[in-house]
Image (spheres, helix red, strand yellow):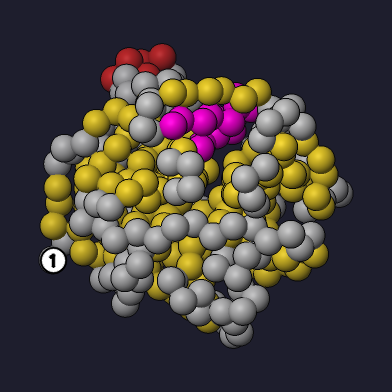
Amino acid sequence: MTTTHEFSGAVLSPLLCELGEGPSFEAATGTLWWFDIVGKILHELELATNHHTSHALPFMASVVARIDAERQLIASEKGLFIRDRATGELSLHCELEPDKPGNRSNDGRVHPSGSLWIGTMSKTGEAAAGAIYHVAKGAVTPLFREVGIPNSICFSPDGATGYFVDTKVNRMMRVALDPATGLPQGEAEVFVDQAGQPGGIDGSICDSEGKIWNARWGQGAVDCYSPTGEHLARYRLPAKQTTCPVFIGEGRIAVTSAREGLDEAARAADPLAGVVFSLSVPIRGQDEPHYML
């Protein structure tokens, strides 16, 4: 039986993002990064000091990953870029879909091997227009085609299992991986079937015990699933369009949210839509891997 917990967290960042997404916590610097995809902004928040910086981008971007102390990897509608932290300069690392200008990047995550899984989708939400790719040192390999809204990309602590979803279908998938490369070693199978149920399976993380923590779009919640797919708990948040969680320290996650698609009345009824929340949950997290050049 699923246990439901009412909201007992706090607003971590009150900035209202149109489409808050892609949170990433850098343990080495104690910094939370996330995007407003539609607003073309990369946000930076030092948790110890609460110092916030907004970095304007020339494109819509959705994933940031540490390379080293000087550089980051950015996934965007124009491909993958290396970002110089000191100057903000962006240099192209590789293209994803140069023949599909109507697509953009969406959910993605670095595998423990140092490779990246990155999903793409239509900017207008067209069904089956996107895909999920594996990127290793700039080499791009298609993994799954005809994906509508790629989300929930995350990996077991040993790197032997990968998870993903097409939110339009709402069936979270599981696939065996080669831990050394992050490449699939078989066919994907259904892990959590929520087809036809309220809300969409959005971004996810996997903790050090193999549990999946998923933001449920449209339901204002983070759901926790066991490694066997059992729905263990739901943690409610005061914004309906929750998008993605991230581990930010022992027993804590941050959760992004969005205002996109809400009319004036809906925004008035959902005033915290677009903020970043902090939530205390019984999680034992794992540090995010670095992208390997």
Q: Which residue is drawn at 36% across and 63% down?
A: 207
Crowdedness near tag 1: few (<14), some (14–19) or many (≥20) residues, C-alpha within 10 Å? few
Is residue 194 at least partly visible in the picture? no
Q: Residue at x 65, y 52 (%)?
A: 67
Secondary structure that dominates the magenta span = strand
Q: What stretch is highlighted in magenta?
A: 33-46
Q: Where is residue 30 in the image (x, y as percent from the top left)?
A: 43, 41
Q: Is residue 81 above or below residue 130?
A: above
Q: Which residue is depicted at the point 85% across and 48% down?
A: 98
Residue occupying image coordinates x 44% and y 71%? 156
> How many numbered dots are placed on residues in this image?
1
The part of the image, by quadrant, that contains residue 112 is bottom right
Relative to 231, is 242 on the left or the right?
right
Magenta stretch holds residue 44: yes
In the picture shown, does residue 239 fall above or below 184? above
Residue that carries the numbered disc 1 in the rendered image: 1
Q: Which amino acid does label 1 sit on?
A: Met
Q: In which quarter of the image is residue 267?
A: top left
Q: In which quarter of the image is the N terminus?
A: bottom left
Residue 74 sits in quarter: top right
Q: Taking 288 as reference, is 105 left or right?
A: right
Taking the magenta stretch, the answer to whether it contains residue 194 is: no
Does any portion of residue 226 appear in the rendered image? yes
Looking at the picture, tell me which residue is in the foreground, 71 or 60: 71
Image coordinates of residue 77 in percent, x first then y, are 72, 40
